[in-house]
Amino acid sequence: MRSAASLSSLAKLASLVLLAWATPASAEAVSPRPQPMLKWVPADVPPAAAPSSRIIFVHKCPITGCLIHPGPNDSRTDTSNIPTQQVSISRFKQSDVVWSKMMDCVRATYAPFDITITDVDPGPNVPHYENIVGGSSGSELDPEFAQAGGVSPFTCAEIPNSISFTFDVYGPDPDQLCWTVAQETAHSFGLEHEYNANDPMTYLGGGPPAKRFQATESPCGTFSSVTCTCTQKATQSSYKSIVAMFGPGAATPPTITIKSPTAGKQVQPRFVVRVNAMDDVAVDRVELYIDDLDTGVRATTPPYLLVAPEGVTDGAHTIEARAIDVQGVPASATVDVDMGPPCTASSGCSGDDVCVMGTCLPGPDVPGGLGDSCTANTECLGAQCLGDASGNKQCVESCELGAAGVCPSDFNCIAAGNGGVCWYSGAAGCCSAGTDPTGPLLLGTSVFGLVLLRRRRRP
């Protein structure tokens, strides 16, 4: 049992309720989301040096309900220190299909860790964590939780044999149920809320419907970013916290595809390999190999852009991009290309490509290509989206100021910060500066504040 002083210092910590009616990422809110409800629930035993179990029992309340006794937390005897009297949580009313999908999601969420997820009761002699799923509202557990979607005891550390709760208030939505189960069980491990919409520990909408524990460091907080209360650190990584406690689970490779160049395409010196890479936790890096040789080129953040080194000879080559996740598990994608001479502004590129600095790159007729409309850097294949004073934006590519033929037809290389970018100059009425790269549109701008005009897409 923690001392009174310890409890006092943590008095503002909550049972960390995940509230009902959380907005799915794919839809707008159908009702106002209640504000967080905070309540400190003390631990019954001191935290252990190692986890007391590696089993999470997701308990589907049957038609007879789930009887919970008040007392020290112990899943083996159905006792919890959240209710003040004996209560019965009513049955889970959703279909078997919803339950099965929810369980698949919970297993996938905890797959990176050495934890077993089951909906079969391990029995009274086996230590385990338990999440009880059912109840028409949180008030069945305690009136204080009438508007809650779930609740867990919380002490900034593991609570052995903890019982947490997910209430049947989301309807037939396995992702919302999964999100709640994952968050409440992880609260029993001592994790706080995170201000990261991709993580199960979040209150935020806008992330993926199926959330996964993130290896990135994120601020703590519910609807605002705050310092983590338990550690007094600025951030928390749910993945790192759980893997430190339980160890890694079965390794799963990331997924990776090469967006460009495409198979059989002719490329030029210093060509760019654009890669999509994803992982259930996080991609650590993407590496570039040419003909099975490591080029030393790396990309660590999306969009993953790998620029081929100098010295690649003319002729056929196999390009390989390898994605390595935070567990060190690799996955790769390959494409065969043909190295040719540098292109020019008027020739050397095929299809929808255009020539920039002697290299063929996707042009304005390709989504995310040079001159295409955009709203953010992530929409551009070159990871640069710049706009004019009216808010019109387009994708740009870097170029060498003062050099001839470095941008395609209808584009000029104009000053931006410490370098230059290719921008469209062919629209009538562009500006008084015409093709002057030092025109008034650029005054007081940086590479990310450059004033440009939207390129009209070709029909």
Image (tube, helix red, strand yellow):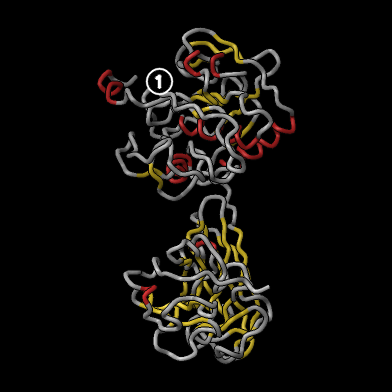
Residue farthest to the left, as pictured: 5
Q: Is residue 287 visible?
A: no
Q: Amino acid at mark 1?
A: Val
Left/right placement of residue 109 relative to residue 439 reads right
**Viewer-nearest residue: 366 or 440:** 440
Relative to 120, is 424 above or below?
Answer: below
Residue drawn at point x = 45 percent, y = 76 percent:
431
Looking at the image, the residue that sits furthest to the top is 85
> How many numbered discs sit on the rendered protein?
1
Name the spot of residue 402 as percent of width and height, x first.
39, 88
Q: Secondary structure at mark 1?
A: loop
Q: Position of residue 43 (x, y in %)?
A: 39, 22
What is the crowding at mark 1: few (fewer than 14 residues within 10 Å), some, or many (at least 20)? some
* Quadrant location, the N terminus: top left
Q: Residue at x 48, y 38 (%)?
A: 202
Q: Is residue 277 left or right of residue 241?
A: right
Q: Position of residue 185 (x, y in %)?
A: 51, 31
Examine the rendering and report whether any part of residue 1 can be seen.
Answer: yes
Q: Quadrant of the C terminus?
A: bottom right
Residue at the location (49% across, 70% down)? 453
The answer to whether 362 is drawn above or below residue 128 in the figure is below
Residue nearer the viewer, 176 or 293: 176
Q: Which residue is mark 1?
A: 41
Of residues 54 and 317, the one nearer the viewer is 317
Figure check: 355 above or below 106: below
375 horizontally vs 118: left or right: left
Q: Residue 434 placed where, x, y %?
A: 45, 82
Q: Is residue 312 positioned above or below 173 on the image?
A: below
Q: Quadrant of residue 436?
A: bottom left
